[in-house]
């Protein structure tokens, strides 16, 4: 045995064995705010159980294992037969199975389902983010399928099931299924109207044969996919099953898996169709309109995913600084570190409050709320996902050199942080989508302004920001070149309005002073020193 040279002291213990849900006051309060009181006890119990699981040593180990052992593609079996299968570490299946069992694909089938699912997604994604992709795709496919009542009747009960079954066999033989999506192609990317995959009608009404490729196909081991292809009547949405009703494999050739910056546990693929059987979803030539509700739902999941990453990053930073001592005291008590931590906590709470408000609008489902979502979802997707990377990087720095070491978990969060800004349309796509809503759907802006107007008079900085926003909106000449600034302002004003109405005064004051009032530097940790930063920090700190 080697001789002992020192005793390990002044190291923060791991953040483990805690309830991820109840430790997040902003999230718990948002659930209470948006759910029917009759549902609260049940929802709190479910979310706390999921939170304890997400914060457990076992599940944290699953997350590490899934990322350390990324999926592997098997194109052929030992005899040379094409199989096109992806093998995952058992930890991946455990995480995905737990997510399905927790109702992360079942929002459409229960009261308050979207708020409950959104909170669950934020909680469970903090354990591991990559498996959120198939959960999101499966959840988001439901509104697209509802454009065809017969398809919805057949498939929706399988998508919203709480049973996870990874075996590839006919969907009719399974208690639950997972969905993926394939829209983009090499030559077009986000410009899906440039797609060249061809759909040739077959004899049976509504069935087609697909020939072509997809540059990004999410979750290639799913049971079925929604894809876009060019039918005789134009770009159309199709359902492509992996296994046909007679038990034979559909032609679905996985050419390779993407070697990605982060999101290592999840398989993103390039696939080829060659006489692939498909069933039309919606009318020919209406593919974008058919799949747009799926896109909107996955964009909300991008907001939720970034919210989860930010919350976990700030929780780790606060936990470390609560235990680490330097220069005669705890880091969390040092004025400059407190400023950094409070700034990070503000960003996290603003994202959480906005994300749950969007989920509540889905549950409401009224025309007013749908109009609100049309503008608020792409604006939130643009801003929250953009804030994720600098925020996670700053949180990692709070751990010093420890935050740069894989064992801390922070590098995995940092590698994951850019993903949601790229997925389902990068920043420019979101900004242009907001412009389309402003120019073509005046009811969307009306709904947004009504939401923001509920906070009128509560904070002079918010009122001034709303006035400035209205001035910007009054002149849309040459607006495309300044679209990012406009969308950023839309998101910040909405976050400010929500925090003024719902957050503690010290949180709303700090947000409005910095994000809306201009009393803020170019980096985190530059909040006005006169604010009650200790209260902001204490509110966000996870208690183990």
Image (cartoon, rainbow, N blue to C red):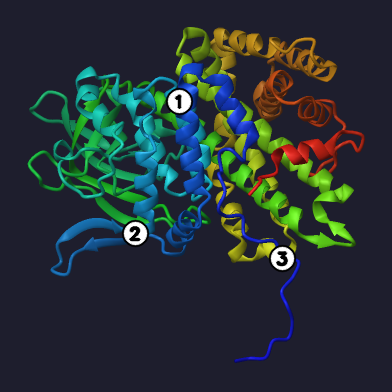
> Mark on residue 99?
none
Q: Earlier in the sequence, mark 3 or mark 2?
A: 3
| Closer to the camera in the image, 213 or 47 | 47
Callout 3 crowding tier (Cα within 10 Å): few <14, some 14–19, many ≥20: few
Q: In the rendered view, would you say 133 is above or below 493?
A: below
**Residue beneath the point at 47% across and 47% down:** 53
> Can residue 383 be seen from the camera position used here?
no
Q: Secondary structure at mark 1?
A: helix
Answer with the quarter of the image where residue 382 lies: top right
The relative height of residue 154 versus residue 127 in the rendered view (above or below) is above
For marks 1 and 3, give the CA distance.
40 Å
Label 3 or label 2, whichever lies nearer to me, is: 3
Question: How busy is the neighbourhood of tag 1: few (under 14 within 10 Å), some, or many (20 plus)?
Answer: many
Task: Give the labeled residue for mark 3.
Answer: 11
On the rendered structure, is 224 left or right of 265?
left
Q: 10 Å neighbourhood of mark 2: few (<14), some, or many (≥20)?
A: few
Is any atom of residue 541 visible in this view?
A: yes
> Which label sits on residue 114?
1
Image position, residue 345 (x, y; %): 72, 39
Query: Where residue 154 appears, x then y in whole percent?
Result: 19, 26
Contact flag, marks 3 and 2 (Cβ < 8 Å)? no
Q: Secondary structure at mark 2?
A: helix
Residue under pointer 2: 90
Q: Quadrant of the N terminus?
A: bottom right
The image quarter in which residue 537 lies? top right
Q: Position of residue 263 (x, y in %)?
A: 48, 52
| Pointer 2 or 1: first along the chain | 2
């Amino acid at each position: 045995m080697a001789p002992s040279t020192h005793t390990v002291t002044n190291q923060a213990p791991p953040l483990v064995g805690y309830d991820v849900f109840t430790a997040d006051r902003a999230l718990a309060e948002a659930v209470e705010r948006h759910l029917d009181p009759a549902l609260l006890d049940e929802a709190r119990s479910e979310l706390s159980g999921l939170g304890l699981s997400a914060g457990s040593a076992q599940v944290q180990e699953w997350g590490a294992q899934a990322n350390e052992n990324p999926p592997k593609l098997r194109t052929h079996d030992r005899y040379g037969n094409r199989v096109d299968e992806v093998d995952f570490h058992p930890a991946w299946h455990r995480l995905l199975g737990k997510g399905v069992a927790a109702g992360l694909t079942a929002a459409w089938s229960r009261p308050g389902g979207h708020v409950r699912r959104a909170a669950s997604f934020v909680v469970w994604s903090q354990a591991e983010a990559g498996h959120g992709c198939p959960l999101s795709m499966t959840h988001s496919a439901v509104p697209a399928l509802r454009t065809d009542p017969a398809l919805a009747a057949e498939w929706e009960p399988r998508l919203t099931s709480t049973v996870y079954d990874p075996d590839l066999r006919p969907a009719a033989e399974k208690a639950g299924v997972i969905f993926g999506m394939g829209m983009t192609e090499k030559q077009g990317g986000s410009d899906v109207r440039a797609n060249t995959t061809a759909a040739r009608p077959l004899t049976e009404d509504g069935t087609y044969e697909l020939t072509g490729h997809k540059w990004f196909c999410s979750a290639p081991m799913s049971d079925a996919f929604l894809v876009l292809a060019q039918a005789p009547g134009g770009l159309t949405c199709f359902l492509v099953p992996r296994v046909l009703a007679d038990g034979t494999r559909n032609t679905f050739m996985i050419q390779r898996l993407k070697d990605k910056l982060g999101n290592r546990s999840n398989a993103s693929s390039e696939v080829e169709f060659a006489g692939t059987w498909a069933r039309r979803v919606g009318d020919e030539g209406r593919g974008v309109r058919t799949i747009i509700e799926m896109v909107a739902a996955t964009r909300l999941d991008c907001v939720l995913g970034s919210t989860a990453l930010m919350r976990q990053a700030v929780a780790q930073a606060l936990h470390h600084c609560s235990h680490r001592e330097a220069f005669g005291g705890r880091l969390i008590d040092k004025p400059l570190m407190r400023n950094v931590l409070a700034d990070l906590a503000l960003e996290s709470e603003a994202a959480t409050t906005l994300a749950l408000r969007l989920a509540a609008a889905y549950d409401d489902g009224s025309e007013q709320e749908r109009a609100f979502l049309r503008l608020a979802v792409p604006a939130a997707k643009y801003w929250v996902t953009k804030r994720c990377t600098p925020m996670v990087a700053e949180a990692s720095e709070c751990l010093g050199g420890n935050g740069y070491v894989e064992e801390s978990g922070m590098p995995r969060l940092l590698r994951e942080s850019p993903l949601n800004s790229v997925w389902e349309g990068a920043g420019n796509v979101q900004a242009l989508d907001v412009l389309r809503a402003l120019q073509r759907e005046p009811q969307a802006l009306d709904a947004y302004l009504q939401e923001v107007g509920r906070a009128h008079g509560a904070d002079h900085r918010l009122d001034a920001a709303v006035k400035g926003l209205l001035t910007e909106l009054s002149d849309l000449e040459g607006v495309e070149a300044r679209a990012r600034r406009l969308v950023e302002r839309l998101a910040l004003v909405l976050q400010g309005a929500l925090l003024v109405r719902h957050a503690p005064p010290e949180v709303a004051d700090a947000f409005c002073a910095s994000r809306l009032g201009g009393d803020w530097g170019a980096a985190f940790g530059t909040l006005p020193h006169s604010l009650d930063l200790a209260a902001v920090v204490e509110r966000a700190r996870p208690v183990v």
